[in-house]
Amino acid sequence: MKRVIIVGNVSEDPFAIDVGHSFGQLADISDLISLKNFANGEFCPRFISDEQDLSGIGEKLAGATVVIVSANSDSHSRQSLAMRNFLIARAAKDNGAEKVVLVEPDLFYSAQDRGPLPAHGRTAHPRDLKDFKKFDGQPFSALMYAQLLKTSGVDAVVTVHNHSRSVQDLFHTTFGGDFHNLLPSELYVDYLLSSDIVDAGPYGRNLVLCAPDKGAVEFVNRMHEGLGLAEAGICIMTKERTGERKVEIKVAEDSPTPLEALAGRDVVVFDDMVRTGSTIVNCCQVLRQANPRRVLFGVSHFYSSEEGRENMASNAIDEILTTNTLPTILNRDTQGRLRKKMVVIKIEKWIARFLQQYFGHENSASRRDFYAVDMSSKNPRWKPTIRG
């Protein structure tokens, strides 16, 4: 069996520790790698070995695969974390590692998914001059990050629900297909079916899944298929620009479920990320016009900000379901007032299960128990016996 070593890029990172533990790694991460800084502030990682053993110097990782778990951290900027990734990968390869895998749940620099030139990124729709101008003077950062990871020694990248086709294409190309964009639909499906967050009714007739824009339709369709509820509806929203700074959100004319059919039903809006929350609140306010029983918001990457917390405290949203791809969302202070209606699906077990499958180590227990749930006791649905 191939030797796999899981490390984090920040000391005592709970996310990386939980991934390693769920994978079955017995050694503490802190006993595998030292993440030190020189007096001048420069970062220098060191894979730990017996100081008295003078044999095999530079070959202690020979034949091993090193997995770097890189999640957001309060103590380091994303720029700092990226540089740490490069140096840890190079340390692994310079000491004999056969392969380096980067696990980065929220892939860095994905927002800069194209540049100012036609060759800078493949998009789902043709780019016009305004789109090129938007990136004028900027670097094509996503491509640069992929290239630097490859140069530093990373051989494969694992991320979660990356929204950009351009980023997915360039990472697939850069890593020869060894790029894995894990979609958390099975997590949401399991939670919707096994909890009381919604009342789906017979065959799902009381449930509607909603895509807030055309970009979310594919994921919502995947969710619908996973639920296996034949009578669950799908509602598709659309955005129309009605002025220079004004956007109108409404139910699309070709939506399988029209607005008036939402009355009395539970509606779950799914998106890949949220920052300010203003658009999603507007979307939910439109849905509220039909008098649904509940309106929920499911999102994979939750960027918490003061503006976002204020916006999403709106009565238009009854509950928020998210993952901890940005682990700081588990902090009650970070959740702020939203802790009263927020549920966080912890994905460390799910990531570890994928790694077990990837390396051929999967066991039957990991197929059944593949995530944990975190919610505040302020949430009306909180119970002391929550799963996980």
Image: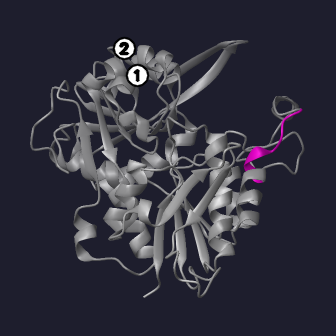
Secondary element at image label 2: loop
Q: Position of residue 263 (x, y in %)?
A: 27, 24
Q: Is residue 224 magenta?
A: no
Q: Residue at x 61, y 81 (%)?
A: 98
In the image, which is nearer the foreground, mark 2 or mark 1? 2
Measured as percent of width and height from the top left, residue 186 is found at 35, 56
User: Which residue was labeled with disc 1?
Assistant: 284
Query: Does 129 sit above or below residue 67?
Result: above
Q: Is residue 29 left or right of residue 296?
A: right
CA gap between label 2 and label 1 equals 10 Å
The residue at the far front in this view is 52
Position of the N terminus, as image quadrant, is: bottom left
Q: Position of residue 229 (x, y in %)?
A: 26, 51
Q: Tag 1: Cα neighbours inside 10 Å, few (<14), some, or many (≥20)?
A: many
In the image, what residue type sits under mark 2?
Ser
Q: Classify 10 Å Cα crowding around label 2: few (below 14), some (14-19), many (20 and above).
A: some
State the extent of the magenta-drawn residues as a range: 137-143
Q: Nearer the viewer, residue 266 or 374?
A: 374
In the displayed structure image, the side of residue 107 where residue 348 appears, left or right? left
The answer to which of marks 2 and 1 sits earlier in the sequence is 1
Which quadrant of the structure image shows residue 228? bottom left
In this view, 362 is above or below 90: below
Up the image or down, 225 lies above or below 331; here it is below
Under tag 1, what secondary structure?
A: helix
Please tell me which residue is depicted at 52% across the width and 22% down the height of the picture.
Answer: 276
Q: Tell me what residue is drawn at x 83 percent, y 48 percent.
A: 120
Residue identified by numbered label 2:
314
The kind of residue tagged 1 is Cys
Q: Taking the image as drawn, is residue 273 in sight?
A: yes
Query: How far across and down, in percent of the image, does residue 93 sit?
Result: 66, 73
Q: Are marks 2 and 1 in contact (CB under 8 Å)?
A: yes
